[in-house]
Amino acid sequence: MRLIILGAPGSGKGTTAVVLRDKYSLAHISTGDIFRSNIKAGTPLGIEAKSYIDKGQLVPDSITIGMVEARLAEDDCKAGYILDGFPRTLAQAQALDEMLAAKGEKIDAVLSIKVDDEIIKERVTTRRVCEKCGASFNVKFKPTKVEGVCDLCGGNVVQRADDTEETVAARLVTYYENTRPLIDFYQAKGLIVEGDNNVDSESCVRSIEEGLKALGI
Ligand code: AMP
């Protein structure tokens, strides 16, 4: 099964993707995570990506598309995957279609996560993530048992550099300009499955599972 998860920053793409990864035994490919690990390791890709990410802008397609193509060629993608945070532009979506068509493959469904902007702003600015395992917490809604320490692996729990109020506003503008149009692109292909994440992630995952069943997946 090959899935895409689409949604605004902080809509819960990552959390939803992890649940579906475990349920359907998929590889979880988060372009944001790949960029962040390159930033941490100080690679040339990371240094270039950081200059865009810190401003809430998209890393150029010329960098991102090749990076995803290389990742999709890895062994763990053979049994299926969930793309989290890619595609984010029409050019990325078209490039993805082409790279899959060349292998006789296609996307099975596109999960569209809906959350109101005001809720996003609150959730993102209070979000904290584990530097080591990537687990997501929230100082208001899901605090760690010990402040700054991951409940799952004991790693450092920090605020992402781009989770500030100012950067979130810029990321939302970027989302509406570049990524939101992808919903129509995939709707036209009959691939959209909706999940409402305004209330809680459990009900969002449930409606996605029902939507996948309705598509015969
Ligand atoms: P995320 O963790 O998905 O919120 O991504 C964090 C940041 O990484 C985004 O705000 C972008 O700057 C960058 N990024 C992630 N995925 C992409 C993509 N597909 N295209 C361009 N930039 C991306």
Image: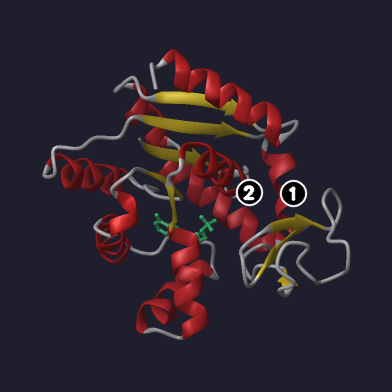
Density class for disc 2 (Cα within 10 Å; few <14, some 14-19, many ≥20) is: many
Residue that protrudes farthest toward the left in the picture: 102
Q: Residue 94 lies in what quarter of the image? A: top left
Disc assigned to residue 123:
1
Numbered badge on residue 13? none
Residue type pointed to by label 1: Arg
In primary-sequence order, the first of circles 1 and 2 is 2
In the image, the residue with mark 1 has its CB under 8 Å from the nearest atom of ligand 1:
no
**Residue in the foreground of this view, choosing between 198 and 53:** 198
Q: Residue at x 32, y 44 (%)?
A: 79
Residues under numbered marks 1 and 2 in contact, where contact means CB atoms less than 8 Å apart: yes
Q: Is residue 176 left or right of residue 188?
A: right
Mark 1 packing: few (<14 Cα in 10 Å), some, or many (20+)? many
The residue singled out by tag 2 in the image is 10
Is the residue indicated by label 2 positioned so its CB lies within 8 Å of ligand 1? yes
Horizontal side of residue 62 vs 192, given as left or right:
left
Residue 107's x, y, as percent?
30, 34
Whether residue 62 can be seen here: yes
Image point (54%, 43%), residue name: 22
Q: Quadrant of residue 209?
A: top right
**Where residue 208 sits in the image (x, y, percent)?**
54, 26
Quarter of the picture holding the C terminus = top left
